[in-house]
Image: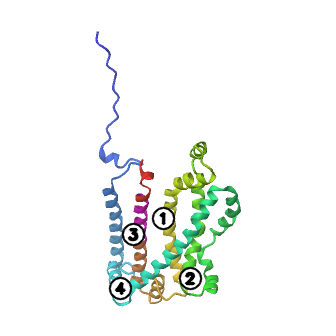
Amino acid sequence: MSAVQPLSVTEPQVPVRRRSLAPLEPVSPRARWMLGLAFFAVFVAVWAFFTLGGFVSPTFLASPVTMVKEGWLLFTEYGFIKDIGMTIWRVVGGFILAAVIAVPLGIAMGAYKGIEAFFEPFISFCRYLPASAFIPLLILWAGIGEAQKILVIFIGSVFQITLMVAVTVGGARRDLVEAAYTLGAGHKGIVTRVLIPGAAPEIAETLRLVLGWAWTYVIVAELIGSSSGIGHMITDSQSLLNTGQIIFGIIIIGLIGLVSDFAFKALNHRLFAWSFVR
């Protein structure tokens, strides 16, 4: 008498083409790059169709060809590279100043609930205030020099970073904290050896996100009382109805932001490679 063979249940084979359209199905890095570039290609094609085809007046929207020509003139005749350097300096200066203050304060708020209760109402109030609203006061206090522009970025970033870091640190796993206490760690050891290392990858990700917001603040700061920077160039171009230069300046901001974002992300992967392993 032969033994009964159990029926084997096999998963249905999903065609590759259908599987690629399944929800939450990951795509390869190469496919991700191709799809991202494809969108930019379609965007430029539609832009060129409407502008070069005469459907939109050049006064309101320059064509891609005109934009490239104006960009070349900015670099070769108007010293645009200096404007880019000044804008980057302002963003980096204001962002680093905000991070130096906000990260330690956020860690303290997340770790100690008394400190959180003291600071959180004021910081929550301030983070809803637009940084641009402070520009008239900052001009009175700091003039129209570099300090005023850096302070705009600082105000726009410091409260956001503080609260996000506090939430990250405060959300630490309780089992890890209890295990550390069981192994003899003190209050200081809990903060330095459990809370901060555990929250470090998310803190770095928070800084990456807020750096992107800082770019929006610097352009606002450069629109008023500035003699250099990308925002200053955009304002001058607007008065001359030169939409080619305006669009080129906007694209440069996006490209610099994209490069800094990729660099920040690569640094995070290198420093906290263990947190990206799934």
- Mark 3 is surrounded, within 10 Å at the Cα level, by few (under 14), some (14 to 19) or many (20 or more) other residues, namely few
Indicate which disc residue 199 carries: none
Q: Magenta includes 155?
A: no
Name the kind of residue labelled 3 in the image: Val
The span shown in magenta is 257-269
Task: Please identify the dominant SS of the magenta region.
Answer: helix
- Mark 1 is surrounded, within 10 Å at the Cα level, by few (under 14), some (14 to 19) or many (20 or more) other residues, namely some
For the N terminus, the image quarter is top left
**Residue with the mark numbered 3:** 259
User: Foreground: 30 or 59?
Assistant: 30
Disc 3, SS:
helix
Who comes first in sequence, dot 1 or dot 3? 1
**Residue with the mark numbered 1:** 208
- Give the label, 4 or 2, closer to the camera: 2
Residue 146 rendering spot, x and y as whole percentages? 53, 84
Badge 4 vs badge 2, beta-carbon distance below 8 Å: no
Badge 2 vs badge 1, beta-carbon distance below 8 Å: no
Who comes first in sequence, dot 4 or dot 3? 4
Above or below — where is 273 with respect to 142?
above
* CA distance for labels 2 and 3: 26 Å
**Residue with the mark numbered 4:** 75
* CA distance for labels 1 and 3: 12 Å
- Mark 2 is surrounded, within 10 Å at the Cα level, by few (under 14), some (14 to 19) or many (20 or more) other residues, namely some
Badge 4 vs badge 1, beta-carbon distance below 8 Å: no
Name the kind of residue labelled 1 in the image: Arg
- Give the label, 4 or 1, closer to the camera: 1
